[in-house]
Amino acid sequence: MIQGIDHIGIAVKSIDEAKKFWVDTLGLKLTHVEEVPEQKVRVAMLEAGAATIELLEPTSPDSPVAKFIEKRGEGLHHVTLQTDQLAECLKALRAAGVSLIDEKPRVGAGGSRIAFLHPKSAHGVLIELCE
Ligand code: CMX
């Protein structure tokens, strides 16, 4: 049910600051920036071959990404795996005993349907599934 890596999310305090490394120094191409109000983040998408790097900047102090940065500092936030059957995938994972953060899909960047798995079921990594 998993097709591959869609993107890798990196929590940053400021997209403008982070761009100096990812775009100016590494030379990745910035494709677009958008706000995802439901998640209280602004995201910048960078082309990196078959996958995308997503810089996540909190838009408010109570954003989950702001809390993540406060607790752990900037860094790798989540890995997003692509599926074309999100609802079925969640059902199968629940049946397999995987702990889900989202029981049902919700809205992510680009209007995609997403759901998070609990890091305790994924060896400490926050996994996002996206359809
Ligand atoms: N990596 C590893 N562990 C993480 C984590 C991360 N990025 N984020 C949270 N956790 C851990 C917490 O420390 C906590 O652990 P304990 O239960 O041991 O204390 C546990 O996971 C649950 O975290 P929480 O914040 O208490 O749980 P919530 O249900 O409130 O929120 C989550 C979970 C992941 C949805 C939220 O923290 C979050 O990160 N939201 C932002 C989502 C995001 O990146 N959206 C981007 C949208 C754009 C797109 O489409 O990609």
Image: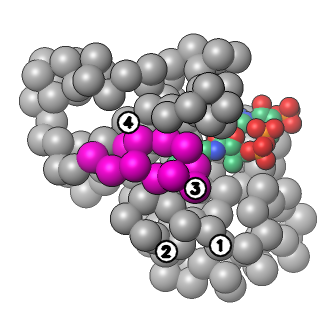
Q: CA distance from mark 1 to mark 3?
A: 13 Å
Amino acid type shown at disc 4: Leu
Residue visible at 33% across and 50% down?
34
Left or right: 99 with respect to 62?
Answer: right
The residue at which mark 3 appears reads as 38
* Image quarter where ligand 1 lies: top right
Determine the secondary structure under disc 2: loop
Q: Is residue 10 visible?
A: no
36 falls in the magenta region? yes
Q: Which residue is denoted by mark 2 in the rendering?
A: 131
- Region rendered in magenta: 33-43
Q: Earlier in the sequence, mark 2 or mark 1?
A: 1
The answer to whether 101 is drawn above or below residue 111 in the figure is above
Residue 9: image location, x then y, percent = 46, 41
Q: CA distance from mark 2 to mark 4?
A: 19 Å
Membership of 71 in magenta stretch: no
Measured as percent of width and height from the top left, residue 78 is found at 55, 42
Which residue occupies 78% across, 56% down?
A: 101
Is 9 displayed left or right of 48 in the figure? right
Q: State the residue position of label 4.
A: 55
Q: Are marks 2 and 3 in contact (CB under 8 Å)?
A: no
- Along the polypeptide, which appears first: circle 4 or circle 3? 3
